Amino acid sequence: MLSEAAIRARLETRRIGTKILVLDVTRSTNSDAMALGREGAADGTVVLAEQQTAGRGRLGRAWESSRGVNLYMSILLRPAIAPWKAPQLSLLAGLAAAEAVREEGVDARIKWPNDVVVVAPRDGAGHRGAAADSSPLRKLAGILTEIEAEADRVAFVVVGIGVNVNSEAAHFSSELHGKATSVRMERGATVDRTALAARLLARFEDCYDAWSAGGLAALAPRWRELSVLDGRRVDVAAPGESFSGRCAGIDDDGALLLDAADGTRRRVLAGDVTISSAYGQP
Ligand code: BT5
């Protein structure tokens, strides 16, 4: 079981985790952290839960949140930033989560804007019984950033991070089979959730400090190293529009850069991305 004391004993952060709340069952740790934010809770407050009954993804989607096996955590932050910069926090949280999981020996990578994924072996080796329609990218973690803001200034931000740590295939709904994975499924051994939570918070603080001082540019080399999209042909479903092109990385504002066949370059600020070419053939 997760506990505040056990996480704190391993925590090496200065400002993230000044207050830590560990809940048993809740609807959504993001909703809890948003409520705490409205009540004036301090910058760096962290909410974790053993189970979520209404875990949320982006755009009204759900986040499957099995009991007692994974990490569901939300970080409350009070940065002095304009609202348009808040999505950058999803990017740095994804980077932090991927880096923390990589220390468990799993080749976790990032997929703009908010996914941590593992690239499945092309021949399906190591994933016996993988469905024929299984994706080349298996989602290991997702990020949901929400804000409370006025037009020109953020009051607070909540960064929600869901990591599949010790889930087994049977924990996922049939819809996610072949599309979701966990640290345990990749590594073949159970992972200490407390240690991973503490490491993730430390990684997050490291990324957050770098971003606060130098913006996304300060994290660009780390992002590029782990991105699965750079150089690949992708399709992007953006609000009300869709685009295709070759991904040229992200810019310093966090927009995805897409080079179209006609030579034009487009900046995409929000959307869902799928890789259109076979993964091994950029
Ligand atoms: C996300 O949304 O990936 C954001 C997930 C954020 C979850 C955390 S948990 C702590 C905090 N409290 C919350 O209530 N939320 C945050 P999106 O990109 O929209 O992806 C959602 C999609 O991922 C779903 O439609 C499914 O296809 C898939 N999915 C759902 N649960 C999953 C899981 N456990 N593992 C992998 N994929 C999942």
Image (cartoon, rainbow, N blue to C red):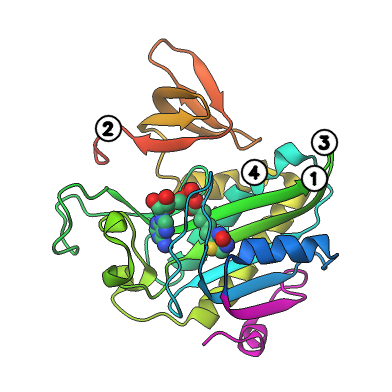
Please tell me which of labels 2 and 1 falls first in the chain: 1
* Residue under numbered circle 4: 87
Please tell me which of labels 2 and 3 falls first in the chain: 3
* Residue under numbered circle 1: 149
Mark 3–mark 4 distance (CA, rounded to whole Å): 15 Å
Residue 15 screen position, x and y as percent:
77, 69
Is 64 positioned to the left or the right of 179 in the image? right
Of the residues tagged 4 and 2, which is closer to the observer?
4
In the rendered view, tell whether residue 103 sits above or below residue 141: below
Q: Secondary structure at mark 2?
A: loop
Whether the residue carrying mark 1 lies under 8 Å from ligand 1 is answered with no
In the rendered view, tell whether residue 239 sits above or below residue 170: above
Q: Alpha-carbon neighbours of circle 1 within 10 Å: few (<14), some, or many (≥20)?
A: some
Q: Secondary structure at mark 3?
A: loop
Q: Residue 151, labelled with which disc?
A: 3
Under mark 4, the amino acid is Pro
Nearest the eye: 35 or 241:
35
Q: Residue 277, labelled with which disc?
A: 2
